[in-house]
Image (cartoon, rainbow, N blue to C red):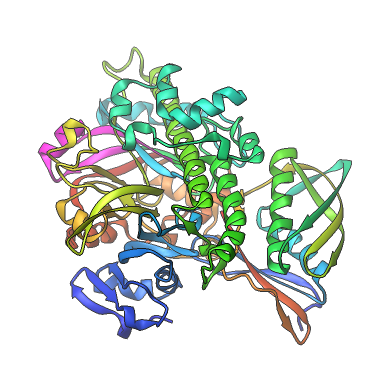
Amino acid sequence: MVTLQDLKRISDYEWEIPQTFRPDMRVPVRLFATRRMLEDVMKDKSLEQAVNATTLPGLVGHVIVMPDMHQGYGFPIGGVAATRLPDGVISPGGIGYDINCGVRLLGSHISIDTAHPHLDALATALNQHCPSGVGEKGAVRLTEAELEAVCRQGSKWALKQGFASEADLRRTEESGCVQGADPGKVSKRARERGRPQLGSLGAGNHFIEIDLVEQVFDSSAASVMGLEVGTLAVQIHCGSRGFGHQICTDYVEEFQGAVRRYGIHLVDRELVCAPLSSPEGQSYLAAMRCAANYAFANRQILANSARKAFEQVLAGKVKDWNLHQVYDICHNMGKIETHVIDGERMQVCVHRKGATRAFGPGAPELPDEYKAIGQPVLVPGSMGTTSWVLVGTAASMEQSFGSTCHGAGRLMSRHEAKRNVRGDQLRQELEAKGIHIRAGSMAGLAEEAPQAYKDVDQVVEAVVGGGIARKVARLHPLAVIKG
Amino acid sequence: MKAAFGFREQPHTADWELEVWAPDLPTLFEQAARGMYTLSGMRLLAVSPQKRSIALHAEDAEGLLVRFLTELLWIEQHEKLGFNDFRISIEDQTNLRAELRGSTIASMDKEIKAVTYHNLAVETTSQGLRVNIVFDV
């Protein structure tokens, strides 16, 4: 068990669990948090899980945990780990079941004053246009051939079908299409689950939210993103639905045998992995990329549905109801990237599980308009609290494999949240604060209560203080749609 | 006093953890299935009973448990079927045969994404067997 005494202070915002903490650690753990946040960090097993993750073969640098960390399974949520090519490993559990779960932010020129009388109608229209809920089918039913095209092309497929614009793709991580996807590595079951669900939100912590751009901290960066104080924005948080869940399930199962074949000792079977250069590792990478592209297309279709909802409600009442893309980020992904580690430039597989890529200014992966300011980073708060728009920094490239936090991070178990919070009462409280709620399940709403999460403002203070992100704007929720 | 078999939810920050106990392996698997359905708030239609037979193999009891629950999740998501009557036999902790009876799902509160192997270990206790299972939700 990790205690406060085991942590070595690097700065006010960065802490280390040295490699000497446990003999099987291959690298140290670096943790971004304020001293005040550490008390909460110690309440669950997230640091123990981070230490377990350091035992994987081929790791370089540190295993990094973000201030929104919390206990997961295998890896902690909020974890970043990089393994060296070609013989380091790839671990499906280090990416998660919801492959390419992520966030998209759309901005607008719609002022809050103009929109205020229509917010309730907008919430209803979003709820109608964007299918959500347990097992809910999506806006698009795919044939087998169409699913394969989605796997290979991601948002490019959505563009061809009229669900996207060129600007949407340019302002999406990887331009909405990860190369190297191979549908031949995806099981029949995953395909069957994927075909009916494209363009759906799902349930759990996924949501669509209408926000007010409340405050801008960097006016030039906000201007480039098209974010103005006093206007509406829309966040979409979801992933690859049952398609990604099944792909991860299939490969966690298959890798149980791979670890035996490659003689890899595990401290937790959910950390199963295979060398990146192995046939098993390559197959998972190709299948994971299919799910990543599916998720990009999913959020793109939901964005298109959100635009339709805005048009339905605001056309003829507001001069410009267009929703323009600010950015779309992944926070559950494995990416082959080049980083400098201990002075050596090398190719690594960066596992981000509940962590956001946060490339600094000048990164060649960024669209031209963002090269000067760094990559936009989208950090949703809990329901009813603020969300943040940040940008990546040069320091994030050096300290955290170009990564930063992904949200508020859970503090309270779902069990405890349901015991302490009544969904219908929470809904009334949020609506009394002027937040319009559409939720498929009151029990699900209770589990996602704001008090079940950390204070997102503190999370942001920790990553900004640690130098791995910079503030651009803060968003205030006006309407939340949950499955 | 704790019943001879059963399940209960354990605190887990992000996901769901279920403690399951039983005098023997088939009962442990049945209780795990019932616990999983309870966590997701599954309600079955009273009409149109359905039967399914499944046979599974794994390297050990833990692997077999994950495969069994994953199979039930697949049937739940693919066929919209849940079960409330389980006849399970297990040989050598590695081969399972089950006759399952149930019906179409009327409603569910929550979606379970996956059954994980996180710290999964079927342990022998003075009363029989126990296991903690973490589900991704």
Among the 4 quarters of the image, the one containing residue A29: bottom left
Q: Is residue A400 visible?
A: yes
Number of marks: 0
Measuring 71% from the left and 68% from the top, which residue is drawn there?
Answer: B60
Q: Which segment did they paint magenta?
A: A211-237
Question: Outermost residue toward the top?
Answer: A316
Membership of A227 in magenta stretch? yes
Q: Quadrant of residue A1?
A: bottom left
**Residue B3 is inside the magenta segment:** no
Q: Position of residue A185 (x, y in %)?
A: 56, 40
Kindly identify the residue that appears in the image at 34 percent across and 76 percent down. A39
Taking depth in this image into account, of A145 and B13 the one nearest to the observer is A145
Q: Is residue A439 visible?
A: no
Q: Is residue A95 above or below residue B12?
A: above
> In the rendered view, would you say B63 is above or below A17?
above
* Residue A277 drawn above or below residue A480: below
Q: Give the answer, above or below, for where B88 lies relative to A380.
A: below
Residue A463 placement (x, y as % from top left): 23, 59
B8 or A271: nearer the eye? A271
Q: A195 and A319: which one is in front?
A: A195
Image quadrant containing the C terminus of chain A: top right
- Image coords of residue B11 (percent x, y): 55, 69
Question: Is A347 situated left or right of A420 in this image?
Answer: left
Using the rendered view, name the quadrant where residue A454 is placed. Answer: bottom left
Residue at figure coordinates x 36%, y 64% from the top left: A59
Give the percent coordinates (x, y) of residue B41: 68, 52
- Of residues A458 and A286, which is closer to you in this image? A286
